[in-house]
Image: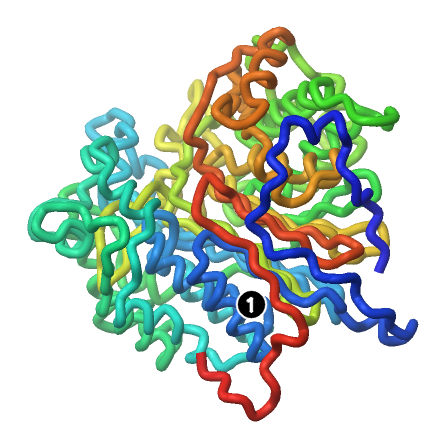
Amino acid sequence: MRISRKSWIISGLATVLCACSQSAPVPDPAPELSPEAESKAWPYGAMVAAADARAVQAGLDVIAQGGHAVDAAIAVHTVLGLVEPQSSGIGGGGFMVVYDREHDQLTVYDGRETAPAAATSELFIKDGAVMDFLPAWQSGRSVGVPGAVALYKAAHDDFGQVDWARLFAPAIELANDGFEVSPRLGSVLASDQLRGALRLDDPGTASAEYFYPGGEPVAIGSTLRNPAYGETLSEIAALGPPAFYTGPRAQRIVNAVTEDAEPGAMTLEDLQDYTVELRPALCGEYREYRICSAPPPSSGGITQSAIMGLYERMKGMPAGLNPMRDLTYWVEAQRLAYADRDHYVGDPDFVPVPAADLINPDYLDVRVTEVGAPDAMPQPGDPGAVLQRGPMIDMWGRDTTEEGAGTTHISIVDMDGNVVSMTATVESAFGNSVMVDGFLLNNQLTDFARDPLKNGVPVANAPAGGKRPRSSMSPTIVFDEDGELAMVTGSPGGNSIVAYVSKTLVGVLDWHLTAQQAIDLPNVIARGETVGVETSATAGEEWAAHLRNEGFEVVDRSGENSGLHVIVVTPNGLDGGADKRREGVAWALSPEEMELPGEDSAP
């Protein structure tokens, strides 16, 4: 396997980076293989990168039992739903990109939540006015039909190598025996600002009893038990998705939504009819690399390839690295890609989305010439006019919907070189705050445009019955010039996900950084008229000053909620990184740590 990236770090950028890493040590070079074996064998071992060490360990244990990356992802995510419920869980949904190395195939499992069949474009119109975000968020109207459990089953049916029921055992054990409350969970529950916005502590609710016993938030380091979640997972383990989408549990979900003070329209039929959509990955080119991510209603496949394609056209192929110049190019590329995303992306089963056109090289050749003034609002392009398919820019009004940041990302490579890049969410922190059977319901429908019209023109992302809201989630897999795995990346962070993920692509593929160094770079979000720069990060103030000098309207930001988890293939093995802005780790597993046949492999 050849890796077409340099192993050294460009000295001009290394001075502004922290060299520390949370990843496992890079393994020794893989042993020499015969030419026949080399074409088939994966010599680099396995790695899991996710937002909590307990979840990562659950995934590695499954891989050690001979599990596929998909098996590991299910074990990881069910644990995350317990230990970081503010970010994701079985009451939400997500996108899973799976790479099957043996057959060289990519599959995208779209487990995005759907609007109830009775939803209309005026889902968030009340008394003739558009609802504000907070009351829309904390309401039954915001709850979409959860997709996570169905996503698990669809992917496991195709790729699972470990018995379905065993995948839930780590989370069930932690739920029943108790887990230690992490600093991140404890701190967010103790936040007066967040507590004031949520109804998580409303008296008499299951969430108040669980998170605020006696009226006080559970303390960091205390032991928290969730037997209701354990029972829910036990029934799903025994009966599969019907334990969630039908019967008494489904009725309790429906009751929670429809009996809300601001009720939604979800029915038992909506739950029973939920389906996971299998979609082809959307891939674009960046130099010798192929960048693949989820297609609409995800924004990942469009934005990641568009940003890198535009960045390449701006930079060309000069010798060496000029960090400040390259920073400007990256910001300009973001601004153009975000403008196109905001205008065109919605659920492709309901609206025409020119996904392939927006990353078509001929379109990008023209789009790169449309960079506007740094202080002007970036405008969408018209791929229909460029590619002579007919103008399409007037098809939709522009939508700048904000998305919440209650999300998590998982990157996994298994012992056979199979890959999962999975981003999952409940939308905003703790979803809509309503707990049913030990898990929180999502508020995913606020990812729709609450106002379905812009200047009297419908927007692509307007609500509709059965429709999936647009997402910024960008679970991404990168391949090198030989078609071999080069990188796995993704992040939570609402609308900023697009920028967070593209930062790691630029950092690793162009600036030749390690996974951890790319993650540690300041976050820069260039959507709309302003550019947000994480000035609290190393080099952040320098980057902000440069962009101001370039004429951009810069907003200083701190406390970024990125949660990047990255795996990079190097000639010496797997190099992993986890975002220090959260609590994740990237841990490796060597072939020697695999369980032998006949060993007790109970999780």
Picture quadrant of residue 395? top right
For image coordinates 71% across by 23% down, the residue present is: 323
Q: Which of the two residues, 329 or 458, is positioned nearer the viewer here?
A: 329
For image coordinates 50% across by 50% down, the residue present is: 409
Picture quadrant of residue 390? top right
x, y (%) of residue 458? 45, 29
For image coordinates 31% across by 77% down, the residue present is: 235
Q: Is residue 307 above or below residue 274?
A: above
The local crowd at label 1, few if under 14, some if 14 to 19, many if 20 or more residues have their Cα within 10 Å, is many
**Which residue position is annotated with label 1?**
70
x, y (%) of residue 282? 67, 48
Q: Is residue 593 above or below residue 26?
A: below
Label 1 sits on a secondary structure element that is: helix
Q: Is residue 116 visible?
A: no
Judged left or right of residue 265, residue 467 is right
Picture quadrant of residue 320? top right
Q: Which of the two residues, 287 or 136, is positioned nearer the viewer here?
A: 287
Q: Is residue 208 above or below residue 148?
A: above
Q: Residue furthest right?
A: 35
Which quadrant, please, contains the N terminus?
A: bottom right
Numbered label tally: 1
For image coordinates 56% across by 67% down, the residue present is: 70
Rendering colour mode: rainbow
x, y (%) of residue 90? 36, 60
Q: Identity of the amino acid at label 1?
A: Val
Q: Is residue 544 visible?
A: yes
